[in-house]
Image (cartoon, rainbow, N blue to C red):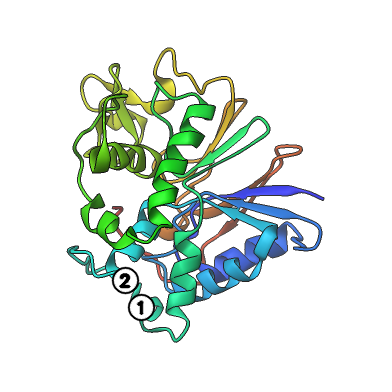
Amino acid sequence: MATYAIGDIQGCFATFLRLLAAIDFNPERDRLWLTGDLVNRGPSSLKTLRYVKSLGDAVVTVLGNHDLYLLRIAEGAWVKRSRDDTLQEVLDAPDREELLAWLRHQSLCHVEGDYCLVHAGLLPEWGVKKARALAGEVEAVLQGDDYQAFLSRLWGSEPNAWSNDLEGIERLRVIVNAMTRMRFCTLKGEMNFVAKGGLDSAPEGCMPWFSLPGRKSAKKILITGHWSALGLVNSPSLLALDTGCLWGGTLTAVCLEDRKVFQVENKAENMLLEED
């Protein structure tokens, strides 16, 4: 038995299957941990959703910003559609409600042993135990009867920092934005959502969220995606696995038991030219 963590798929289903062949994945024996953003921008979001859902307990996936974007569109929440969206086949699928309900019931943050799987990252004030509890607050609403109202108010970049005094949608929005959108922060933990490049693109006064001094999750191993410009990071306390498959790079898997890295190039699928 092996556990493989895999970076953002974003509808690149053919590349995903090639990576599974490269690791000799067997769902009766192995487990997959997926960093979120299963869908959008790649050509095969529907096939990706159907396949990952079919794996049952052999897969753990967390929600990424593109997964939440799909849910918002599907539930009629106001959103400006991007010209690069590739979600319509999911919205038109005969099994869309089953797939969307499954997606809505996935975790925002998964904690197991020394590992924490989250799409983007954790704010410096949050240890892993607190992060899991905060993720549970969002999941309870997203899986509840009033989830449409929550999705309709989710989008926005304010507040941009955590406070224990936050309540309601502002509290939930900060949790979601940190776990699905964050890259750079100030020393005070204020999130910057503008800069999307590599480490050398840090805005003045900002640094990567994982470099903030005193970060309370630093003693655990965080597994993330989201930041393709960062590239592969395989360090003792961080596995960053979005290696830009969608943009013509590779799709990456790391075996958690021995840290062996597997990568396949995206040769067979349409690729986009700019990141969002």
Q: Earlier in the sequence, mark 1 or mark 2?
A: 2
Q: How far across and how far down the image is residue 134, in percent?
A: 43, 36
Q: How far across and how far down the image is residue 262, in percent?
A: 66, 50
Mark 1, Cα crowd under 10 Å, few <14 / some 14-19 / many 20+, is some
Circle 2 sits on which residue? 74
Q: Is residue 170 visible?
A: yes
Q: Nearer the viewer, residue 126 or 45?
A: 126
Q: How far across and how far down the image is residue 189, in percent?
A: 30, 22
Mark 2, Cα crowd under 10 Å, few <14 / some 14-19 / many 20+, is some
Q: How far across and how far down the image is residue 247, in percent?
A: 40, 57
Residue type highlighted by circle 1: Leu
| Left/right of residue 211 with respect to residue 110 in the rendered view | left
Q: Is residue 269 visible?
A: no
Q: Residue at x 42, y 84 (%)?
A: 93
Circle 1 sits on which residue? 91
Question: Are discs 1 and 2 less than 8 Å apart at CB?
Answer: yes
